[in-house]
Image (cartoon, helix red, strand yellow):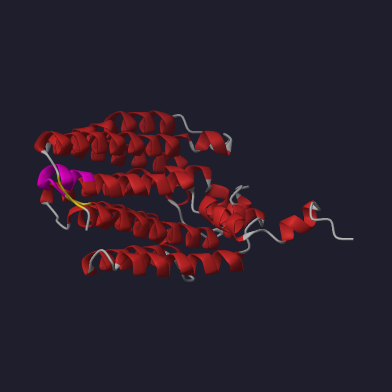
Amino acid sequence: MWNPTHSHLSFRLPVPGQQLRLSFEEARPIVQLIFAARFAVGGAFLLATTHDLNLLLALTGQIAWLFAAWAVYLYNGLTDRIEDQANGSSRPIATGKLEATTATYICAALATGGLLIGSLVSLQFAALIVGMLALGALYSAGHTPLKSFPVLGLATAGGGVFLTYVAGGYAYTGHLEPSLLLIATVMALWTVAAGNTKDFGDIEGDREAGRKSLPILLGIPRAAAFTSTASCAVAALALLVGILVPLAIPLWMLIPGSVVIAVRLRSIDPDQSRQLLRRGYRSFMQSQYAANIGLLIVCLIGGLVYGVHLKLC
């Protein structure tokens, strides 16, 4: 007699909601949250300068961009199975909790849904979603994806960061301003400069998958020195942009972030555990959160102080 509480059978027949949850877990919730914050910052910054908000389009755009970013990182998880398994990752596809076929269907549905929903905002916004999906495909797809090359891979990731801020501005207000492009450029360069801090903990899996990350190409000491120098250079640019654009002062949070990254990479040891080798990556993410939250608060206060013309449709 069938027992509905039998654990083996319940695992083989998971409900759709479980598959969706696992796909979101595969797409890294912490990364999806930072993408949502970037999008909101782009909108809030232009809200503070143009004082014009279309609430319905803003919410529609936020959902569409979530679907697009989710699809990009889910697809990345599909193509990262070999290195994730070699690195002992607990991500659902690597552990077999989420089947590759199911993840592929979800990924296609998210990409299609994001594009269709995004087209309701504007043609320009839909074009930005196409650009985001294209960058994701270039980064992960094919026999020689761009993620296999340190500079090209990070530049592609930085492009996705830049588009996210721009998309937020378009969705919230339908406008763009050069000052927002400055902020987007700084945060994109921060990803290019410090994003490879993740690779220090993934050397074994990257080498097995044939990926030429910076620590593999240069060796850990030189890769650490390069990343530290590049991070400090971007932090200096953030200082300059904050001086030129007062609303961008929260970008200065990248300055202590670059210092912490430099200190942690200076003491890095190949024999350390993967968790210790990824400390620089955690500092990279924490500084992004601090900068984006600060930007969001400052811009929302600016919008409230100077008044916002709210439109519902």
Comparing 69 with 61, the one in front is 61
In which quadrant of the rendered image does the N terminus lie?
bottom right
Looking at the image, which is closer to me, 183 or 274?
183
Does residue 219 appear in the picture of this structure? no
Quadrant in which the C terminus is drawn: bottom left
| Count of numbered tags | 0
Please provide the residue range marked out in magenta: 44-52
Q: Position of residue 38 (x, y in %)?
A: 30, 47
Residue 190 position in % (x across, y down): 30, 44
Q: Residue at x 58, y 35 (%)?
A: 273
Q: Is residue 37 visible?
A: yes
**Does 46 lie within the magenta span?**
yes
Main secondary structure of the magenta stretch: helix
Indicate whether 98 appears above or below 269: below
> Closer to the camera, 261 or 8?
8
Q: Residue at x 36, y 56 (%)?
A: 63
Residue 213: percent from left, percent from top: 45, 52
- Is 300 inside the magenta-drawn segment? no
Residue 127: x, y in percent?
26, 68
Identify the residue shown where x is 48% and y is 60%: 76
Choose top left, top right, bottom left or bottom right for residue 19: bottom right
* Image position of 127 (left or right of 196): left
Residue at the front extreme?
Answer: 312
Q: Looking at the image, which is closer to me, 109 or 243?
A: 109
